[in-house]
Image: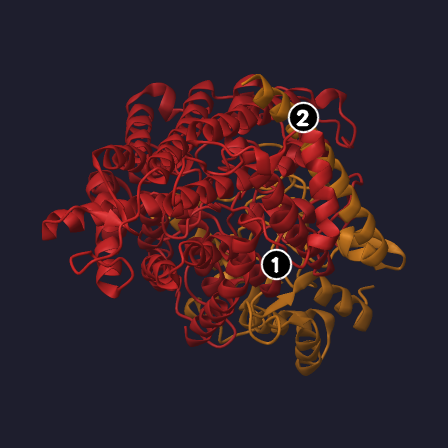
Amino acid sequence: MKKDMLTGFIAIVVMTVFLGIVYPLAVTGISQVVFPSRADGSQVKVDGEVVGSSLIGQSFSRPVIGKNGKPVLDEEGEEVLAPDPAYFQPRPSGTGYSADVTYFANVGPNSAEGREEVREALATYVALEKPYDHSLTKDRVPVDAVTHSASGVDPHISEANARIQAHRIAAVRKLPLSQVEDLIAANTDGRSLGLLGEPGVNVLMLNIALDEEAPLK
Amino acid sequence: MAQGWLQIAVFLVVLIALIKPVGIYMARVFTNQRVFLTPVVGPIERLAYRALRVRPDAEGQDWKSYARSVIVFSLFSWLALYLILRTQGIQPFNPQGFHSGPWDLSFNTASSFVTNTNWQYYGGETTLTYFTQMAGLTVQNFVSAAVGIAVVVALIRGIVARSGRQLGNFWQDLVRILLYILVPISIIGALFLVSQGVIQNLGDYSVIHTLTGGTQILGQGPVASQEVIKELGTNGGGFFNVNSAYPFENPSGLTNFFELLLILIIPASLTYTYGRLVGNQRQGWAIFSAMFVLFMAGVAVVYFAEQHGTPAQHLAGLHTHAFDGSTGGNLEGKEQRFGIAGSSLWTAVTTVTSCGAVNAAFESLTGLGAAVPFANLGFSEVIFGGVGTGLYSMLLYVLLAVFIGGLMVGRTPEYLGKKIGAREIKLVSLGVLVTPLAVLLSSALASATELGKRSIYAGINPQGFSETLYAYLSQANNNGSALAGYTGFIQSNPPGNVGAYGISFADLLGGVVMVGARFLPILFVLAVAGALAGKKVSPAGLGTMRTDNPTFVVLLVGIVILVGALTFFPALLLGPVVQSLTTRLF
């Protein structure tokens, strides 16, 4: 028993040092040398400034400005945000696209609240896109556009979702629709190895490409 | 769905192709033979024995001695982890300045990681220092997995022993499993994950100014080195709160595939190792087949269910059919890049094994889809199961099946030439029943008390009951996945854990359940190993019931289903079954 205690004590100390310090630091060291950009979170720069990570979705909304020239606040004193029509919009997030406090939206399958959220998201989506895509009806809205992602920062939207939003972008940015569609295709991450996962349009990368192609004044 | 099934088929083909080489390799490691890594690892191994003061070949252990070493080592592991969790304020690698966790939450977390459960009441990126993640959690990811494998190796030695009572040396098994299996795969796997976008750094969280003038803070950390062993060791505790749904843990379809493979490779290959060690490969394939049948049933059900959307979505007027450019289905709480197929396969894989890492929100699964994780946990993690734990739990069921089969044909039950007597069957029954018993008692207690109800998120309704039942199913089976609304920790002002506190009832009950349902079965398993080790082997005769043919596989599957269903059916009726039969909202 005494020998077991001694061995057990030494074992956890030695293993903490090697598996808990040496191993992760060694992997960090190698990663920082061989894959520095990936290891630091695939950060993307525009004009030398980091604007996000290509793997992490972000909000493309802006504060609503009231008649008095100040941002409109809701009952809780938070700024009311509205989608910026000049940008492709990401999937709904249950966390405000937080990348340092993550949690699931936890909407249950039989949740009455969940039904209201989907109903509202559908109405908002159709209201935003229908002026530009007249044939849009509720039954053409792809599921990714009105459901919370798991991470809250899903970087992708579906191709169908992007194709609907393309009409709005083309109108607002005064670009031919075909050019917007080409940009979508260029910023679509296909299935890995052509087989694994689902294709998705990377919203941040697409919006950066849009800004380059047709800068906002 | 055809494309989705193709992905699932490719996954299965790759997995099955790897089972033989990995199985053979592990068999050589467990029997102290030379492997291709020996020239590199051998010197480190000898150094480790010197440091631990063990002379492995001279010190075989009987079951009591082996069990004592397991318990002593796990006790020190628990103390070390608890100490680390409670001293965060003075640690290096703490760029966010996190404080120590509350005592009750730390009790739960320490119990969780030492038992290979990785149930998480805390949020990683908002409460834990990089030091805790590395020196506390990553270490337990490795060693709790190694302990599980060591126990099954000891059981196998007991089954095949021709004489004596020795089950090998725990410390030697621990060292060899770490050095020859878990660490090498982790180093290579971690670097591969980084190459695909999983982060690995020690930097501050980066503050970013977004294109529309907002700010976003990117959580950072040494993620890949933990991610890989979290899957490989069927641990499952995410670096980030949303686990493998988070792009920095699991950025693409390829990493999703790779991580799924990591989760299943050891539990699946151990069946081959088993066949090799008992000298009859068909015995291993029989066990594999039983596991595979149950696994595929789960995959099919959850994929079918999730492709159909939820009552809440349908009533809101959303069309959940798939069409060109859209996955369709229930994408609530799922990521676009994994889609319905990748999320469904993961849901089945992570709950048949005791991994519990998730790439989608379980709370948002359809009623029928959620029934699969419930069922997989209800079968006590014997469908592949955790590394080591899955096979030893399944072997208890095999002995049970042999016993019941023996009763049916009226002969003395025997397995691989060893007679199964009253003592063995008593131990097997205890080993099989202790986990379900822990689940039912604890979830009943939590459902019936006001203290228990404080943890519920969805309210007092079927979903709320599902949360509670699942929480204790998951903790007792050392799985760790959750219907994540259920909580044992209130973080009032995230990020940072100032003013945060645990819910003592949930933390303590869960911690006790995890420890009890991990170590009691281990003791029973080792006792069975000890009992079998001393038995003489009699040659198989005409009347011997075969345990390597399809008939036995059917019997085994039947018994697993029977025990699970009889135990949990009443409880399941109140939660997921009600939810999948109704379109009512609440």
Give the left or right position of residue A120, taking residue A131 as reference.
Answer: left
**Relative to residue B8, is residue B241 depicted above or below?**
above
Q: From the viewer's perspective, is B296 left or right of B502? A: left
Instruction: In the rendered view, tell whether residue B230 sits above or below residue B287.
Output: above
| Amino acid at pointer 2 | Ile
Whether residue B442 sits left or right of residue B483 in the image: it is: left
The nearer-to-camera label among 2 and 1 is 2
* Nearer-the-camera pick, B514 or A162: B514
Amino acid type, callout 1: Pro
User: Residue A19 placed where, x, y %?
Assistant: 69, 39
Q: Residue A90 carries which label?
A: 1
Helix, strand or loop at label 2? It is helix
Picture disc at residue A10: 2
Across and down, in percent, residue B35 comes to: 63, 57
Quarter of the view holding residue B166: top left
Q: Report whether residue A59 is seen.
A: no
Q: Mark 1 lies on which chain?
A: A
Q: In the displayed structure, does residue B214 sit left or right of residue B408?
A: right
Mark with earlier residue (2, 1): 2
Image point (55%, 20%), residue name: B501
Where's residue A74, x and y in %?
Answer: 59, 37
Colour scheme shown: by chain
- The chain under label 2 reads A
Q: How far apart are marks 2 and 1 (CA)?
A: 51 Å
Residue under the image location 74 percent in, 48 percent down: B200
Q: What shade does chain A have?
A: orange
Q: Residue at x 58, y 25 (%)?
A: B492
> Quick one: label 1, few (<14), some, or many (20+) residues within 10 Å?
many
Q: Which chain is tinted red?
A: B
Q: What residue sits 36% from the left and 25% below the top?
A: B453
